[in-house]
Image (spheres, helix red, strand yellow):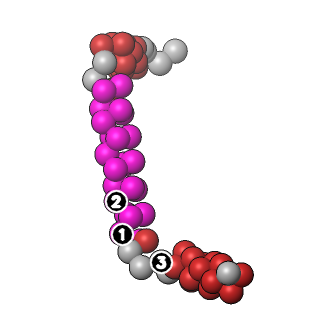
Amino acid sequence: MLAALRKAARETIRLSRDEKGLSTIEYAMGTLAAAALAAVLYMVVNSSAVTDAIQNIITDALSNTPG
């Protein structure tokens, strides 16, 4: 019984160290996170508050005279 448990533990450790396909999952998660961030940024930048703020900043910058 103990020998079988040790063998199962060794096999579990061996399989957990096998990193085949790990980089594929990492790339997929990174791509998903980047797409989610891009969607959030797009929504924020296109909101009326941000658009108005950017427009006010540009208007102020162009209408100010050196003083």
Q: Is the magenta stretch mostly helix, strand or loop?
A: helix
For the N terminus, the image quarter is bottom right
* Distance between the alpha carbons at the discs numbered 2 and 1: 6 Å
Q: Are marks 2 and 1 in contact (CB under 8 Å)?
A: yes
Residue 45 image position (x, y, % from top left): 33, 26
Say what amino acid the circle numbered 3 marks: Glu
Crowd rating for badge 1 (residues with CA inside 10 Å; few <14, some 14–19, many 20+): few
Mark nearest the camera among 3 and 1 is 3
Q: Which of marks 2 and 3 is nearer the N terminus?
A: 3
**Does 3 appear above or below 45?**
below
Decide if residue 23 is on the left or right side of residue 55: right
Nearest to the observer: residue 16 or residue 31: 16
Say what amino acid the circle numbered 1 marks: Thr
Is 26 colored magenta in this rendering? yes
Residue 62 image position (x, y, % from top left): 35, 19
Q: Do the residues labelled 2 and 3 touch (CB within 8 Å)?
A: no
* Distance between the alpha carbons at the discs numbered 3 and 1: 10 Å
Disc number for residue 28: 2
- Residue range of the region highlighted in magenta in the rendering: 23-44
Quarter holding residue 22: bottom left
Disc number for residue 19: 3
Considering the numbered disc 2 on the image, is that residue within a helix, a strand or a loop?
A: helix
Disc number for residue 24: 1
* Numbered-mark total: 3
